[in-house]
Image (cartoon, rainbow, N blue to C red):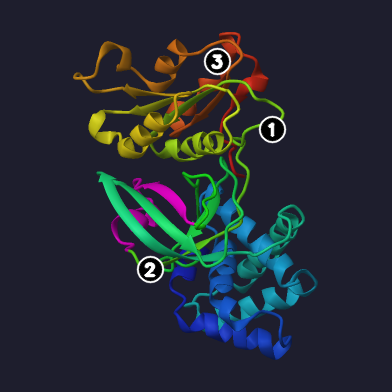
Amino acid sequence: MNLAAAWTSVDDRAAGDFWCMLEDRRPGLLPQREASLFFAAFGGLVAGGDDRAGRAALLMVLGRAYRRYDLLPHATTVGDALLAILARHAPPPLWTTVWERAVDRTTHAVRRAAARVGDGPAWWPAEVIGHERPSPGVAILTVRPWRRLPHHPGQAVPVCTPRLPGRWRWLSPANAPRADGTVELHVRAVPAGTVSHRLVHEVRPGELLWLGPPGNTGLRLDPRRAGDLLLVAGGTGLAPLRALVEQVATAPDGRRVTLVVGARAFVDLYDAIALDKLQCAHDWLTIVPAFSDDPCAGPAEQGDALTIALDHHRPGQDIYLCGPPAMLVGARSRLLALGIPAARLHTPATFT
């Protein structure tokens, strides 16, 4: 049995025992109400078995938690408490030395993360107040954080459902900050994506989600530039780019925005109603659909999103791209080969 498999078998009592052990060793170190979420995140990070983006989300959340609760001077106490709980709850065989090394590596990684994540809450509880399924395998969730989430258009936030505690995934809000504080999240259920599957198919209004600290992805608008924009979206990569459109709409400055939205066919254009409303409301906005596999599409709409976007490219535009890996692979080199300056190209950063 590997560490990840051993961790999944740890029972529900372990989080409570972990907090009690911490409280015995260092009273007041961690609030009891936060202990379960912290334990799930820390143990999941120690056990590994996640992809690089999921690990980066966990490090963002835990780095902030260590700063928030001043855990860095007591990192050894926290790690020792986890080891003691694993010895009590994890099934045999328990490779003590392997777990110790994993805890040590994780503690060092969290220390490094804490040095760069800044201060503030580690997580925001948020109620799901809307759950729509506009297209097969895609959900639009509207959530209301219990306290305002300080996000900016183009950022991403780690998201966790209590259905899978300790598993955090990056999602980009599809809206600029709203007066009521609500956040819209677009989720596609991907193969083997346990978190995305639950968010799309199981989560319902009234449930709780956890949102982690917003992180920059390379898609925020540069405040020093006010030129026209060419936004190229594929699938749920539309979310952060729609947020950029909403940002421009809050303070129109004369720039023109072209948003190319890629999908396989018209039925996959999951956010069509919201896009129509945006285009009707703003004469500076042009929305262009791009269908890669729809014989009913018009000639100007047939093709992949980047190819269609190049038909709408004008000198001086800043280009933002977001979509599935297949869309982004080679996109930057293709655009550079066409003579588009690197400073005008914006693609999502890879979380590592």
Could you say which is closer to the camera, residue 47 or residue 34?
34
Q: Distance between the residues labelled 2 and 3?
A: 43 Å
Q: Name the residue under label 3.
A: 335
Could you say which is closer to the camera, residue 184 or residue 40?
184
**Hey, which quadrant is residue 106 in on the image?**
bottom right
**How many numbered discs?**
3
Task: Categorize mark 1 by other alpha carbons within 10 Å: few (<14), some (14-19), many (20+).
Answer: few
Task: Categorize mark 2 by other alpha carbons within 10 Å: few (<14), some (14-19), many (20+).
Answer: some
The secondary structure type at the circle numbered 3 is helix
**Hey, which quadrant is residue 37 in on the image?**
bottom right
Residue at 51% from the left image edge and 81% from the top image edge: 14
72 versus 19 height, above or below: above
- Residue 4 at what x, y percent from top left? 49, 63
- 20 horizontally vs 162: left or right: right
Q: Mark 1 points at which residue?
A: 223
**Hey, which quadrant is residue 299 in on the image?**
top left
Report the amino acid beneath label 3.
Leu
User: Closer to the N terminus: mark 1 or mark 2?
Assistant: 2
Can you say which quadrant of the picture contains the C terminus?
top right
Task: Please identify, in this view, whether the residue under mark 1 or under mark 2 is nearer the observer.
Answer: 1
Q: How far apart are marks 1 and 2 (CA)?
A: 37 Å
Q: Answer whether residue 242 is visible to the viewer in this image.
A: yes
